[in-house]
Image: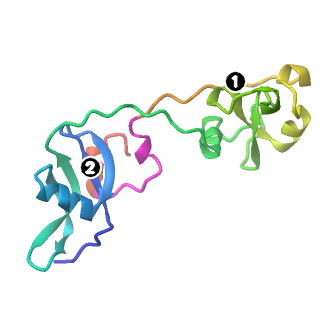
Amino acid sequence: MVQRSIGAPVLVLNQNYEPINVCHVRRAVVLIDRGKAELLVNGNGEVRTPRLVFPAPSVIRLVQIVKRPIIQRRLSRRDVFIRDSYTCQYCGKTGHDLTLDHVMPRVRGGPHTWENVVAACIPCNHRKAGRTPKEAGMKLLKEPRAPRPNPYYLFQRRPVQDEWRQFMPWVV
């Protein structure tokens, strides 16, 4: 059998088989050893200690259900561009050479929130400058808003291993 890296990713499922986290093999083995989780899928390897050999997990399930609060997404540059489909919210130009624009400028008390930040191309951002869209004679294509909370946000940009697919129905 192959010795699996202790830093390899392991999918952690809640008691109801809902994916809740990804941890490393080392943490998963500790959870299994303490009786807090059970091995569902062996990652085709093993973890060796001086006295014992454990199957290296790829998917584990917690023995007791863990209630998780739905976490609001952090405001980040990349997530604003994704929300706005890499499109300038003033002229409709698409591309990856965008900037962030505060609808109500920060120098005038505008907050740095999802509802006040949009993607803008450089010419539109310069044209609007430190004014509101109305003062600059510009109109937003759509009103900015915070993305809806998604409990699976953690898995959106993570490579999904083949053994995990049966537990993640939204993955094609």
Q: Which residue is mark 2?
A: 12
13 sits to left or right of 126: left
Magenta residues, start to end: 151-162
In 3D space, how far apart are the residues under numbered discs 1 and 2 (Cα atoms)? 38 Å
130 sits to left or right of 57: right
Secondary structure beneath dot 2 equals strand
Residue shown at 37% from the left, 54% from the top: 160
Residue shown at 43% from the left, 53% from the top: 158
64 sits to left or right of 111: left
Q: Which residue is mark 1?
A: 142
Residue shown at 80% from the left, 30% from the top: 105
Amino acid type at mark 1: Lys
> Split into 4 quadrants, where in the image is the N terminus?
bottom left
- Tell me, yes or no, whether the highlighted magenta stretch contains residue 154: yes
**Does 75 sit above or below residue 28?**
above
Secondary structure beneath dot 1 equals loop
The majority secondary structure of the magenta stretch comes to loop
Residue shown at 88% from the left, 32% from the top: 128
**Does 156 sit above or below residue 24?**
above
Amino acid type at mark 2: Val
Earlier in the chain: of badge 1 and badge 2, it is: 2
**Does 148 sit above or below residue 41?**
above
Q: Which mark is residue 44?
A: none
In the picture, residue 54 is in which quadrant?
bottom left
**Which dot, 1 or 2, sits closer to the camera?**
2
Locate residue 159, reporting x and y percent: 41, 56
Locate residue 164, reporting x and y percent: 28, 52
Seen from the viewer's position, the closer of residues 160 and 53 is 53
